[in-house]
Amino acid sequence: MHSIARRHLPVLLGAAAGGAALTASALTARPAQADPGDDTASQARGLLRRMRVDQDATTADGPVWSPLATGFAGVPGEGLPDGAVGGLGGEIITVTTAAQLAEAIARTEPTVVLVDGSLTIEPFGANLKIAGDTSILGVGRGAEIVGGGLHLDRVSNVVIRNLTFRDSYVAGDWDGKFDDNDNDGIRVDTSRHVWIDHCEFARLGDGQVDIRKDSREVTVSWSIFRDHNKTLGVGWTDNVVTTLTLHHLWFSSTYQRNASIDNVLHGHVYSCLLQGQTHYGMMSRGASSLLVEQCVFEDGEDALVAKDPDSRIDSRHNRFTAIRGRKDHTGATFEASDHYAYVADSRDEVPALVPAHAGPHARKERTGRRIRVALDGSGDVASIGAAVGAAWRSPHPVEIVVEPGIYREVVRVWPGCEGLVIRGATGEATDVVLTYDLAAGTDKFYGGDFGGTGAATLAVLSGDVTVRDLTVENGYDEALHGGSQAQALRTVGDRIVLDGVRLLGNQDTFLGESVSKGVVARVYVRDSFVEGDVDFIYGRATMVFDGCEIRSYDRGAGPGGNNGYVAAPATAQDTFGILFTGCEFTSSAADGTVHLGRPWHPSSDPNVEPSCVVRDSHLGAHIRTPAWSDMSGWPWQDDFLREHANTGPGAVPAGGDTTGRPQLTPEEAAVHTRETYLRGDDDWTPWA
């Protein structure tokens, strides 16, 4: 179901779930219980008691649940000597329906709105407008806003705490590009003194939090952003006036905007945890000036990016683990301590500290042993990536069952997903299609290209993962954009099983890697279909293809021409390479125009020993002689490229001439088997 465009939403916010707007008498209202003479901090602590949150936990930076705003939101402003306090001192209203919420947050008087329970917004995707001098506070555990969000438009002094915003995701629109999908979690436009604290954002439609159009004195703290494409965006202006603090945030299994910070005068980021950022981590854009300190970046690409000539990042004491690409540092920017007091918790403490305390009070993510993905709304989630993110954080193995449909998204299975199974629900791979269309040579909007690690539609970076009964496709259009590497699947972990899958692409469809040259990564592919044209099965991993169809595209070359290469092994020394056994090699290409493979020496590395064996398989007439080809100046004859007991019009007949078609000796044939390649020291037998 697509959301309804904002321009079609009713003008009166009372049209939220529950029907017509309620009168004030229908709300649960009580006067604030502040004693005369109580200071602001005392009143704020009283609200924390009403919220039933933990007031005891502290860090070097102060209370985890600070009574008053931190960072730039806590900087004094006109009429706000303590910074953002929301509706503190005003009427306290408890709401239990979305209609009550819509009415309460639109009041013109200072108001504290206590959200009790789960509130579903209607129409789906609506953003309820908030008046100034308002606090929206979740009560205890389980306060959440489902299917919609909040909109701050030219207001001041708003506090939002202890809430989960979830599930306004528009099925099939992972990119957030549908015309009727503007479903943000919180949108802040031209507003001042805004504090978003201890919230969680998951599976929303467009941006999880957008801070736009010259908003100032904004802090987002102790919050969680997860399982999403576009998380936290800042900018939408040519002016450079925004002041922003981001601290103790947890970004988990996200794609981009973590955060994307455009034309921010002072942006201070400290003690944040970023894990699993597929496209890029944190970005300074336009004339933004950022101070990023004591943050931890794990498993991702381009952790810190200064995009434009005037973009600045002062990177101090951050930690980068398993990060490929940019970690920009342009020099000193500003000192946050000139604006407010703070103590950045150490990067050594952040990986334990932030997951323990970020998000709503007593938050606990409960993930079952099976997650169902469906585009029609009948599943637990509507995107494969969201299911994988939940599985990654789960303390136990998870099976993800994907219902039929076309899922256009980029998915990463990060290290630590051992035991994960992703399978199509029907058992027929053609029913479930995971697809995207990036190529290694596709330009990133901030410079460089996606390369060999960023373009794959699906990358499995963990060990002990099974993918079964689904299609993984890279839909990059070579005819339109020109030839380029475009992986459907990239694997890095050990003990990967691909069972009954379809891998579709052109050049470099499937890359099997290992973590490093000295580490063995075994991949077992059974009863599957792999399609491509140039080097479409390649890499350093030990890979066995058992009973698969290996189909070469017809690139249009006629007899005597070249229609491509199947395999390009880059086998590490003292390991096994690629083995095809009991497979069928097919193509509509002209006879004798496709090579079985060629030896890949990455970066002309002389220390690899490319190895590929095709045995007991049926070879179509498209296979040529010699069956192997040189690559980048490396003669194929110098590496172990062999056949054995193959049949079909493209094979060497029994007793035939083997010139250009070297065969295994009987002794070698006894060694180059599925069992020898895969058993290892752990006696792995995935075919059993």
Image (cartoon, helix red, strand yellow):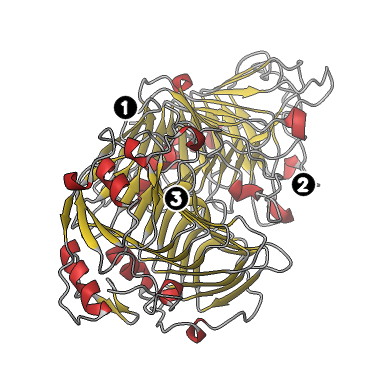
Residue type of the residue flagged with mark 1: Ser
- Residues under numbered marks 2 and 3 in contact, where contact means CB atoms less than 8 Å apart: no
- Toward which corner of the image does residue 55 lie, by quadrant? bottom left
Quarter of the image with the C terminus is top left
Residue linked to disc 1: 378
Residue found at x 37% / y 57%? 224
Front residue of 416 and 646: 416
| Residue that mark 2 sits on | 634
Q: Position of residue 377 (x, y in %)?
A: 35, 28
Query: Residue 629, how many percent across, how many down?
Result: 76, 35
Circle 3 residue = 208
Of badges 2 and 3, nearer the viewer stands: 3
Verify CB contact (< 8 Å) between mark 2 and mark 1: no
Please tell me in which quadrant of the rendered image residue 199 appears.
bottom left
In primary-sequence order, the first of circles 3 and 1 is 3
| Image side of residue 552 versus residue 108, left or right | right
Question: Within 10 angstroms of label 2, few (less than 14), some, or many (20 or more) residues?
Answer: some
Q: CA distance from mark 2 to mark 1?
A: 54 Å
Q: 645 or 512, which is in the foreground?
A: 512
Q: Position of residue 27 (x, y in %)?
A: 19, 48
Asked which secondary structure carries label 2, the reply is loop
Q: Quadrant of the N terminus?
A: top left
